[in-house]
Amino acid sequence: MREGALHPVIPAIANAIYDAVGIRVTNLPIKSEDVLELLRQKMAFCDQIPVSL
Amino acid sequence: MTTEKIYVKPKTIGEAARIASEHADDFCYVAGGTDVLVNKFQGNKECSCLIDITGIAELKEVSVIGRYLKIGALIRLDELKKHQIIAGEYPSLIAAAQEVASPMLRKTATIGGNILCENRCSFYNQSEWWREAVGYCLKCDGDVCIATGGKKACFSKFVSDTAPVLICAGAKLELYNTDGISSVVDLETIYTGDGIKPRNLPVTAILKSVILPIGNECRIVFKKLRPREAVDFTSLTTAVSLNKDGKIKIVIGGVDPKPVIIEGVIDGKIEDYIKKALSRSRVVDNDYYSRKYRREMMHLFLEQSFEELLK
């Protein structure tokens, strides 16, 4: 997990996740559990934005 | 590390049982060896005598006797799908077997070994120095359970994938006892719920075969959660069955020292059964995934399984 983070494949996968669902995963390994939690945080944040904006 | 003094490969079941009774306090049966040898080299379970039972031909047979299907304990997980009768009667058993470990391990691991698989915990299945550094847990002669932060009971999880499906199907086990007499027990009754000694079978008994009813028109849905598709042990296994009389059976593995079993009828409220399953599971943080996530996924898997069964 240490040197792994220097290789381009893992950031590419993290970018692919950002491209697909709009969340930035900053921890390795990328667990489905963390992705779900970040998605929830994103949705909770979006809900706070007033509709008039 | 290699502590065994004796390695024997008997040709008959009687001979194997006899050698086992001679070394009753310090031996281990080995079939596929995919777990036994790993546990041995990690120092989890050491013994001075290994009895290799793979030379016993009578444990490798699949036969139909009346309305029962008998699957020999030494049938490898990958071989199950080659038997038409199993594929036709219990496709979910094949699905469960195909989810165990990796393709290479499935060519070695046996169904008997999978049913009797040792309970696992992220604080127990580690190397010797790791366990020594952390402080030994209850399962390796320590004083407290580390996963729960000091409880006096072991919560290592039950990890067999085929057993939940077999319990749903009402499987029985045929055992060969040292006195030479075969006995048949219900699979669901062999689990004790104690993580340190998870099964109540006699030490020297040999599992001969798994007996399943034929034509009981029971549909089973199997689901499994694990980090990587082709290596890991289960974090959560669910099997839900519905038979022609409208009876349902929920069996959950990976969340308790024994399989969690809930029975009911389809007329009842599904949500109540799911709540009951959740409250009966003693999930602790001893896995790759957190306790919270596994409970959430358990709810989801059971909902999805019922949707598939009832559509």
Image (cartoon, coloured by chain):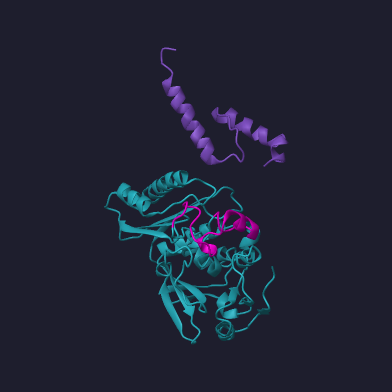
Chain colours: A purple, B cyan
Residue B225's spot in the image, x, y percent?
A: 51, 49
Task: Specify the quadrant of the image occupied by residue B58.
Answer: bottom right
Against B12, residue B195 (above or below) is above
Question: Residue B168 location, x and y as percent?
Answer: 41, 62
Q: Nearer the viewer, residue B115 or A33?
A: A33
- Is B207 in front, or is B146? B146
Q: Give the residue at x 59% y 50%.
A: B229
Quarter-wise, where is residue B248 in the image? bottom left
Q: Where in the figure is residue B4, as x and y percent of width and height? A: 67, 75
Question: Is B247 or B124 nearer to us in this picture?
Answer: B124
The quadrant where residue B44 appears = bottom right
In the rendered image, residue A3, in percent from the top left (x then y), is placed at 72, 40
Classify residue B152 as left or right of residue B270. right
Q: Is residue B189 magenta?
A: no
Number of marks: 0
Does B236 appear above or below A30? below
The secondary structure that dominates the magenta segment is loop
| Residue B67 can be seen, yes or no | no
Does A4 sit above or below residue B141? above
Q: Is residue B149 left or right of residue B5?
A: left
Residue B155 lies left or right of residue A27; in this view the side is left
Q: Residue at x 47, y 44 (%)?
A: B293
Q: Which quadrant, please, contains the N terminus of chain B?
A: bottom right
**Residue A16 visible in the shown view:** yes
Q: Which residues are magenta?
A: B122-151
Which one is nearer the viewer's eye here, B68 or A1? A1
- The residue sitting at the left extreme is B267
